[in-house]
Amino acid sequence: MEKPVKEYINHLIHAIFEREQVKKSITTLKKNKYFIPVITMILCLSISVGITATLKSLMGKKEVEASIAANSAETAFYNKKYDIAVAEYTKMQESEKDWPIWNMKIAEIYSVKGEFAKSNELIEKVYEARNKLVDTKKDKDKEKDENLEAKDKELMNLIVFTTLMNGEYKKSLEYGEVFLRKYPTDKNLLRTMTTIYLVNGKKDKAKEIVDIYQIDNESASDLAVIARMNMLVDDFDEGFALLKDAWYKDKNEVKVFDVIAQITDYNKTDIVDRISKFEGKEPNELVYKMWMAKIYSMSKDSAEKADELIEKLDDEDVGNVNLMLIKANMYQNMGEIEKAKDVLDEVIKDDPKSFIGYHAAAWQAYNNQKYAEAFKDCVKSIVMNKDYPDNYGFLIPEILTKQNKSEEAEPYFRTALYKEPFNYNIMIKIAEYYGNTIKNTSRALYYYDLAARIKPNDPEIYYNMALINLNNQKPDDAIELLKKSTVINDKDPKYHRALGTVYLNKDKNDEALKEIRKAYSIDKNDILTLNNAGCYYISVDGDIDRGMVNLKAAYDGMTKETSTEDREIITENYNRVKELSKAYNKRNGATLKVPDLKLFY
């Protein structure tokens, strides 16, 4: 192919040179030995560009992939290539010496890695550099730099938040109060400071922050955020009132129902009771019915109740997006997968290029096991709305888990918490990530402890911390945590059952029996408690008949909802004791060996 191209170029040059006017113009230039090669090179490049353009035209334009990263350092950060991210930020800081934001980003990376000492040291340097730069800037220079205040707010909030994440609760409070004096109305800082006051046990101060928060009454999203903040300081009536206002402001605002999901997640009974009381006063109020439909849609046990409510709401003015999302969740939990897909398709079709359209498309692709496509759609959703924490903190981690990349969720979790630092649901999700995926129990306990400081009356947090301590061979610490759970919620058999198991393993048999009996008195049909009772009577009292009665009740009480693991343990215990019972009846005075039986926490 080389020869025809050369011939074509030579022919072209010859044709150009034959033109009379051109001849006169270039006669002198032709004497230059470099002229012909230069012309040849220019023509080659022109032809190459023309061919490339033609091919692109024929092939069509390739879509540019969306990215949530603002620069190469952020790209490396989200790919969990922290060393590369640090190197890139270092270069960026060297070329931008008049503001220390990139060093602060490096401190953030150290924090995410758990290198808290390095992070804190760099934060100190950033803080000092920031003060020096601000103090030395003359007023006229500040006026020229129109973005200085915005940059300062960003830097300050990142300093406060990262210090908090490093476990330096008092230091984060010191930084925060200094910055609050300068920017008392900055919403990002106020959200972070609400968290910091709660973490430091200063709920009254957190309440003051919530009270001075300047609500954007035209923004349903902002109303939902402040509603959540009010609930964190135990002002549920005001929180629900604001959430109601948010719904009426925009019935398609998803954050309204995110708040309902978050507060229900760990205290369903209480939230249902509160909304039921509102309904009693306003039986025709649609927002309460929508909230109840959302709550019921979240569980397999109550999905049919959601269906009954939605039938009544279908012809009402309740907004389309949230109703469709509730339906999709409901159908998913009812096992009607195709109906769930049809509903999500409707959401996507209504507004495909929107933040919620891409979000729904990501869930749809996820449900269809198209995880790469789900990730791309979720990224597009983030690009459309970078402040929606659920994409970072819930959807992306779920997608990465299905791709066997769950360890890569770490940077997304950090961003989610930065967007909404008071969201203890995200904290618990991060704790589960470190405990179950990374197997870093110290980091898991740290995030559980952080969540407990935000929501000290959640017994489930202490229960999960107790399980980690048991795994770390610290039963005494586990006992103290489980005691907290039973004090907070004395009506859940799980906490008493777990405490009884720990006591039994420590040979504190009297305390163990007391807790087992307490669990049984709360729920006589709880198969896990029945299993433990049977194990106790056989292994401690040597009462095989009584133990067998309890184990058989546990065995017979299993349903299709019983997990595979629980089923295996109960069945194995039951069969072992059944064989022991047969041997006991035929023993003729022989000594019997009690088999190893498994207990539930």
Image (cartoon, rainbow, N blue to C red):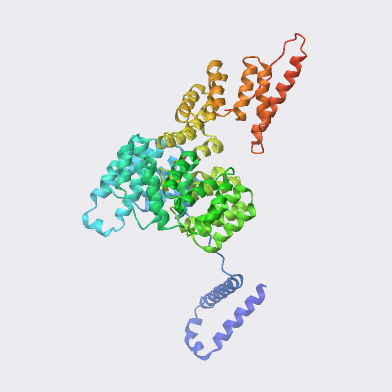
State the residue in front, 278 or 482: 278
Q: Is residue 12 above or below residue 316?
A: below
Q: Going by the image, does 418 lie left or right of 493?
A: left
The C terminus sits in image quarter: top right
User: x, y percentage for residue 523?
Assistant: 57, 29
Q: Is residue 159 above or below residue 526?
A: below
The N terminus sits in image quarter: bottom right
Name the residue: 60% across, 30% down. 526
Number of marks present in the image shown = 0
State the residue in front, 378 or 38: 378
User: x, y percentage for residue 531?
Assistant: 63, 26
Q: Is residue 36 above or below residue 417?
A: below
Is residue 331 among the parts visible in the rendering?
yes
Displayed quadrant of residue 545: top right
Q: Which residue ends up furthest to the bottom in the rendered image?
A: 20
User: x, y percentage for residue 14?
Assistant: 58, 84
Name the residue: 65% across, 14% down. 542
User: x, y percentage for residue 63?
Assistant: 55, 64
Is residue 375 among the parts visible in the rendering?
no
Q: Which residue ends up furthest to the left in the rendered image?
A: 139
